[in-house]
């Protein structure tokens, strides 16, 4: 399968990704950069973390490209790496929060509301929804973000999460049910 950039007439094969020169790497980044960054913003809701994870994803993609097995499309593989890196970042933040009880950690905060989704967080209803999404399991959160926010079909979500179609449908359904329950509890508080 070939990917074509609107910025260039360069065609990049999936197998050739590991042998790209600097200009070709830029085209490759142009093809997937905004997709990865937007997913990171949806998942992490922090501009700085989204930027860092986006860079980490591309480092990982370029490092692992020679091992790409073509079991799914290259785009799906990049999505899978992105979701896994976002989950890793969230786990890292949770560990840091746990240890900050014992060791105070000063993390500078800044207003990085450049991304439209991050600007929406000021809305109280959106805040409530985002807090509820954060309480979901990693798998349910991933499935709902990919399906409802990224607009992927259930088949595409199944490919990214490496699940069977029925398991993905069930995961999305359970995620929506869990989200409903969490929102009901929040509204009663």
Image (cartoon, rainbow, N blue to C red):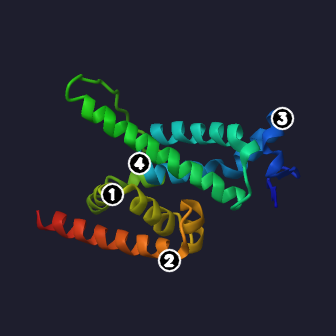
Circles 2 and 1, Cβ within 8 Å, touching? The answer is no
The quarter in which the C terminus is drawn is bottom left
- Picture coordinates of residue 11 (x, y %)? 86, 53
- Spatial CA distance of label 2 from label 1 is 26 Å
Q: Position of residue 74 (x, y in %)?
A: 71, 56
Q: Quadrant of residue 23?
A: top right
- Residue 178, quarter of the rendered image: bottom left
Q: Position of residue 161 (x, y in %)?
A: 53, 61
Q: CA distance from mark 2 to mark 3?
A: 41 Å
Mark found first going from the N terminus, 4 or 2: 4
Who comes first in sequence, dot 2 or dot 1? 1
Question: Which residue is more in the foreground, 35 or 91?
Answer: 91
For the residues bearing labels 4 and 3, Cβ distance under 8 angstroms: no
Residue at mark 1 to residue at mark 3: CA–CA distance: 40 Å
| Tag 4–tag 1 contact (CB < 8 Å) | yes
Would residue 176 be seen by someone viewing this image from the given angle? yes
The residue wearing badge 4 is 45
Q: Earlier in the sequence, mark 1 or mark 3?
A: 3
Which residue does the numbered mark 3 point to in the structure image? 21
Q: Of the residues tagged 4 and 2, which is closer to the observer?
A: 2
- What whole-number distance in Å separates the C-alpha atoms at marks 4 and 1? 9 Å
- Residue 158: mark: none
| SS state under label 4 | loop
According to the picture, the residue beneath numbered tag 2 turns out to be 166
Question: Count of labels shown?
Answer: 4
* Residue at which label 1 appears: 130
User: Of circles 1 and 3, which is in front?
Assistant: 3
Please identify, in this view, whether the residue under mark 4 or under mark 3 is nearer the observer: 3
What's the residue at 81%, 49% (across, down)?
15
């Amino acid at each position: 399968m070939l990917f074509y950039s609107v910025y260039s007439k360069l065609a990049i094969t999936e197998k050739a990704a590991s042998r790209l020169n600097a200009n070709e790497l830029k085209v490759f980044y142009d093809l997937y950069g905004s997709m990865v960054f937007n997913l990171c913003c949806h998942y992490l809701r922090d501009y700085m973390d989204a930027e860092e994870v986006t860079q980490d994803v591309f480092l990982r993609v370029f490092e692992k490209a020679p091992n790409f097995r073509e079991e799914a499309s290259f785009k799906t593989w990049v999505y899978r790496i992105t979701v896994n890196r976002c989950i890793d970042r969230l786990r890292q933040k949770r560990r840091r929060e746990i240890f900050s009880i014992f060791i105070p950690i000063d993390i500078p905060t800044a207003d990085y509301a450049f991304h439209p989704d991050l600007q929406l967080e000021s809305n109280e209803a959106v805040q409530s929804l985002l807090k509820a999404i954060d309480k979901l399991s990693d798998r349910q959160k991933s499935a709902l973000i990919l399906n409802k926010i990224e607009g992927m079909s259930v088949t595409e979500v199944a490919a990214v999460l490496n699940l069977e179609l029925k398991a993905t449908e069930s995961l999305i359904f359970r995620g929506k049910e869990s989200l409903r329950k969490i929102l009901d509890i929040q509204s009663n508080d």
